[in-house]
Amino acid sequence: MELSWRPPPDVLVISGGHNDRRWRPARVERAAERLLDVVRGHWPDTTIVMVGPIWLDTAPAKAYAVRDALVRVARRNDVTFLDPMSTRWPPEAVLPDGVHPTAAGHKRIAAWLAARLV
């Protein structure tokens, strides 16, 4: 396992993403549970924070389903959950493809996350 040789981090951020919407919410939920089990097995003292999908434009229903699946996992496992989908991101934060952040978008996401981790 790749985690076994790494020193334990103080905080580990696990984030749902755009690609997770391809799967049914139950599958996302099971995968997130397994990931938490593996991480806690290797690093029991590490603080884990889950972040929902970062959607810079209008999110489809499937993205909300992924977010809700991750919320359930976080609640069951006493993990902090952060919801970037509740934030309105300005148009200059997203590239013309409507998916990927611009350099300014990356800065906004980093600032948003940092403010919540402190």
Image (cartoon, rainbow, N blue to C red):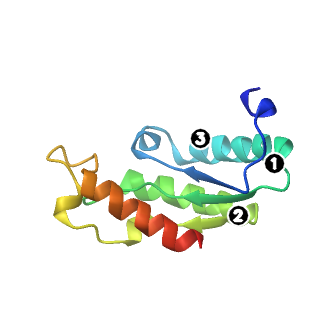
Q: What percent of the width, then of the height, locates residue 67?
A: 50, 58
For label 2, count other residues whose C-alpha is less than 10 Å away and answer few (under 14), some (14-19) or many (20+): some
Specify the quadrant of the image occupied by residue 61: bottom left
Kind of residue sitting beneath label 2? Val
Between 15 and 112, which is closer to the camera in this rendering? 112
Residue most toward the left?
96
Tell me which numbered mark, 3 or 1, is placed earlier along the sequence. 3
Against 118, is 44 above or below?
A: above
Against 45, is 75 above or below?
A: below
Against 115, is 62 above or below?
A: above
Q: Point out which mark residue 27 bears.
A: 3
Left or right, 83 with reference to 29:
left
Between the residue at mark 3 and the residue at mark 1, the CA separation in whole angstroms equals 20 Å
Residues at discs 3 and 1 in contact (Cβ within 8 Å): no
- Circle 1 sits on which residue? 40
**SS for tag 1?**
helix
Residue at 67 percent of width and 43 percent of height: 30
Tell me which numbered mark, 2 or 1, is placed earlier along the sequence. 1
Q: Quadrant of the C terminus?
A: bottom right
